[in-house]
Image: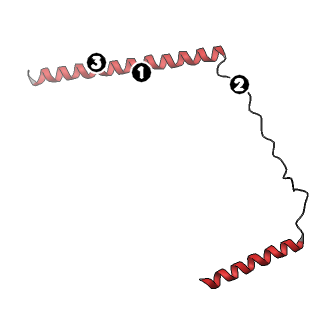
Amino acid sequence: MTIWEMFQQSAILTLLGMTVVFAFLWIMIMCVNLVGKLIHKLGLDKDVQPIKPLKPEAPKNANRTISPEITAAITASVTEYRKNERTDE
C-alpha cells in the first residue's frame, strides 16, 4: 500500500466519521426539539403549584425599644472587653 492510498483511505475514513457524527447530532437535536414541542403541547411544562411570593414579616419585638440602661451596660461591656483584649497581647 503506497502513501497516497493510505492518505486516500484516511481521508475517506475522516469524512465518513465526521458525517456520522454530524448526522447523529442533527437527529439528536431534532428529537430534543420534537420532545420539547410535545411536552409544551401537552401542558406538562407548567408548575403544579404556583410559587407564592414571600411577604416579609415584621419581627415580633418590633414595637419594643431597648432601654437606655441596657444600651449603657452593653456599651460598657464591649468597651471593657476591648480594653482587656489589647492588654493581653
Residue at (57, 19) in percent of width and height: 36
Q: Quadrant of residue 37?
A: top right
Q: CA distance from mark 2 to mark 1?
A: 33 Å
Query: Tell me, what colour scheme is on the image?
Result: secondary structure
Q: State whether residue 45 is above or below residue 80.
A: above
Q: CA distance from mark 3 to mark 1?
A: 14 Å
Circle 3: residue type: Leu
Circle 2: residue type: Val
**Mark on residue 16?**
3
Outermost residue to the left = 1
- Tag 2 residue: 48
Quick check: 35 left or right of 10? right
> Which callout, 2 or 1, points at the residue further toward the start of the chain?
1
- Tag 1 residue: 25
* Image position, residue 53 (x, y; %): 77, 37
Outermost residue to the bottom = 87
Rate crowding at label 3 as few (under 14), some (14 to 19) or many (20 or more) other CA atoms within 10 Å: few
Q: CA distance from mark 2 to mark 3?
A: 47 Å
